[in-house]
Amino acid sequence: MTVTQEQADWFSGAFAQLVANVDKAILGKEHSIRLVITAMLSGGHVLLEDVPGTGKTVLAKALANTIEGTQSRIQFTPDLLPSDVTGVTIYDQSNGRFEFHPGPIFASVVLADEINRASPKTQSALLEVMEEGVVTVDGVGHPVGTPFVVIATQNPVEQAGTYSLPEAQLDRFLIKTSLGYPDHDTTVSLLLDASNRSRAAAIRPIIASDSVTTLAQLASEVHTDASVMGYLSEIVSATRADKDAALGVSIRGALALARAVKTWAIASGRTYATPDDIRELAVPVLAHRVIVDPEAEFAGVTAEAIVERAVASVTPPAYRAA
């Protein structure tokens, strides 16, 4: 089934409304908001990395409040246990059997606040559910349902009391982005409204959780030409061949970018994806999956630079709009 132009126009309008609603809480960060919503509608998860106090948690809360679904927040701390996230099986003496008590991971939108303050053992509890949407406890699988999106915030790893996320964990986030500090005019607007300490709480739902699933399904049907996917594959291969990369982008990363470009394209009102979509999303989707060689990192090379070099090294194809 191919997306029609009428469907693309409807999707684009709904996407713009979602962005505008979240922007009421986070002023002047439209591009970051678009990336976060793109990840959600692509069936992926979001990692927000920035220094404290830039609005990461506010953005995550605002998106959660925009969707009329279940929400939960997990404050990650060094003493958090895996069962505190996934849930636990408890013996019920009244009926003589074990019963599963679900943890906060069972929600449509899960805010994982300061995720890199938890231990690697707790991080591993998220691997299965972020990839497969299932939590296995005592050998029994428990689906979390759809839609399901984890929006995680983390402080830079140089901050005291933080753990570096394992490569397998990073690979499960579709997009990694940051907010940064607001510009002068936005800062003045925020200061004038300084008495409002809960901007995200004022955000009201504008879309049902079922509609999120519908939008995601529509995005998955966007046309992608074989030459465009070939272009994507060559960029991914270039990250693996880069002299400064200890580990390039995995096939999971390539698939994530393929899903994201479809959503990015239809959000722009198009029924087909282009090489421009890939170039715009390459860094936020791929960079956090690249491991820089320690010597190159010491010399100042970043994962973002490696992805940018990969994009620059591959000639985009001539493509025909479907």
Image (cartoon, helix red, strand yellow):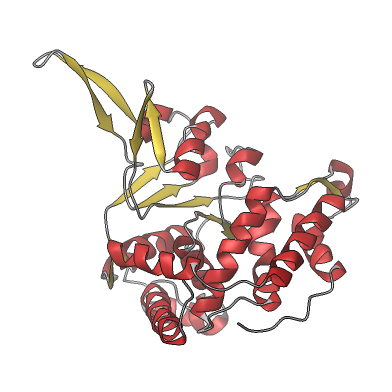
User: Could you say where residue 196 lies in the image, as x and y percent from the top left?
Assistant: 31, 70
Determine if residue 5 is in view. Answer: yes
165 relative to 1, above or below: above
145 relative to 1, above or below: above
User: Relative to residue 248, is residue 190 drawn left or right?
Assistant: left
32 relative to 304, above or below: below
Image quarter for residue 311?
A: bottom right
User: Relative to residue 147, is residue 223 drawn left or right?
Assistant: right
- Along the line of sight, which residue is nearer the eye, 35 or 191? 35
- Along the line of sight, which residue is nearer the eye, 184 or 227? 227
- Along the line of sight, which residue is nearer the eye, 216 or 130? 216
The residue at 49%/46% (across/down) is 114
The residue at 34%/60% (across/down) is 64
- Along the line of sight, which residue is nearer the eye, 320 or 294? 320
The residue at 54%/68% (across/down) is 35
- Judged from this view, the residue extending furthest toward the front is 1
User: Could you say where residue 111 lies in the image, as x and y percent from the top left?
Assistant: 40, 51
**How many labels sit on residues?**
0
Q: Quadrant of the C terminus?
A: bottom right
